[in-house]
Amino acid sequence: MKMKKKEMSLDNKLNMLRAGVLGANDGILTVVGVLFSVVAATTNPFIIFIAGLSDLLSCAFSMSAGEYASVSSQRDTEKAVVGEEQLRLKTNAEDELELVANFYMEKGVSKDTAHEIATALMQKKPLKTAVNVRYDMDLDDYLTPWGAAVSSLISAALGGIFPLAAMTLAPTSFKMEATILATVFSVALTGFLSAKLGNGLAKKAVIRNVIVGIVTMFIHYYIGKLI
């Protein structure tokens, strides 16, 4: 008999999507920044390509490592609060029972029914119930750092490919324009996705990302000119 594979929770899915969107945005901006700095200093296509590719790889692995460390820290915090809750249940179980009962009363359940529900839940799964009520956290589903790390690695690399491919493959007379267009399109897309994930205003996020992308290209280009 095959065991049913546990489905990934919504929190973990959203965490991976968040890491992916942020990774893609950073990949785009860091790569185009390096490309514009280098292209302002040299016209050698090989040097421009190698500089962009090197930055793409370093950005992807840096973002991945950062996400792994960040989510690992959050996961450690989750485990720490579970430990605190275990101690509360051992030393003051009655207060934890009242906490759960109050939780249901705040939702409109009568006092007697709320205590019945709380008693039943605390007898069956006390730690899981208390952690869920106090911290709105699922005891069986900690955030996974590897998912966020892999998502960030792949998305940062894919994001950086847009400006790198435009700068590398476009005709010589159109390289700068093609790279600008590729960058504007890709940062607009990441702005739109980030707004959708965060229930924000898509138009505002797209405009903000496009402005940041243009400013990034402008600054790096003139830094390259100065060098």
Image (cartoon, helix red, strand yellow):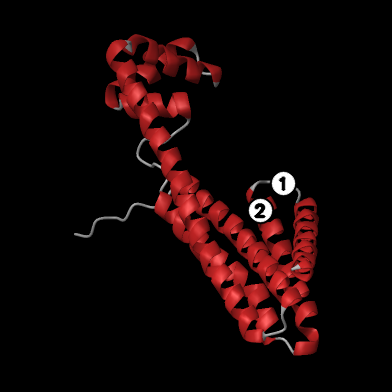
Q: 206 and 122: which one is in front? A: 206
**Which of the image's four quarters has the N terminus?**
bottom left
Q: Position of residue 35 (x, y in %)?
A: 68, 72
Q: Looking at the rendered structure, which numbered label has been put on residue 13? A: none
Q: Could you say where residue 189 lies in the image, as x and y percent from the top left?
A: 70, 63
Q: CA distance from mark 2 to mark 1?
A: 8 Å
Please, what secondary structure does the residue beneath circle 1 have? Answer: loop
Query: Residue 211: x, y in percent?
Result: 80, 58
> In the rendered image, which quarter contains the C terminus?
bottom right
Q: Describe residue 79's horizontal placement relative to residue 193 as left or right.
A: left
* Spot occupied by residue 146 in the image (x, y as percentages of width and height): 40, 54
Residue of label 1: 200
Q: Look at label 2 and name its amino acid.
A: Ser
- Name which residue lies at 65% across and 46% down: 198
Q: Residues within 10 Å of mark 2 (few under 14, many from 20)?
A: many
The amino acid marked with disc number 1 is: Gly
Most distant residue in the front direction: 227
Q: Residue at x 24, y 56 (%)?
A: 3
Left of 123 or right of it: where is 54? right
Mark 2 highlights which residue? 194
27 up-or-down from 145: above or below: below
Res 156 quadrant in image? bottom right
Q: Which of the pair 65/198 is nearer the observer? A: 65
The picture quadrant where one finds residue 124 is top left
Check the image and name the residue furthest to the left. 1
Residue 155 visible to an observer of this rendering: no
Would you say the residues marked 2 and 1 are in contact, meaning their CB atoms lie under 8 Å apart?
yes
Q: Residue at x 69, y 51 (%)?
A: 195
* Looking at the image, residue 96 lies above or below residue 12: above
Q: Is residue 65 above or below residue 129?
A: below
Mark 1 Cα-neighbour bin, 10 Å: few <14, some 14–19, many ≥20: few
* Element carrying mark 2: helix
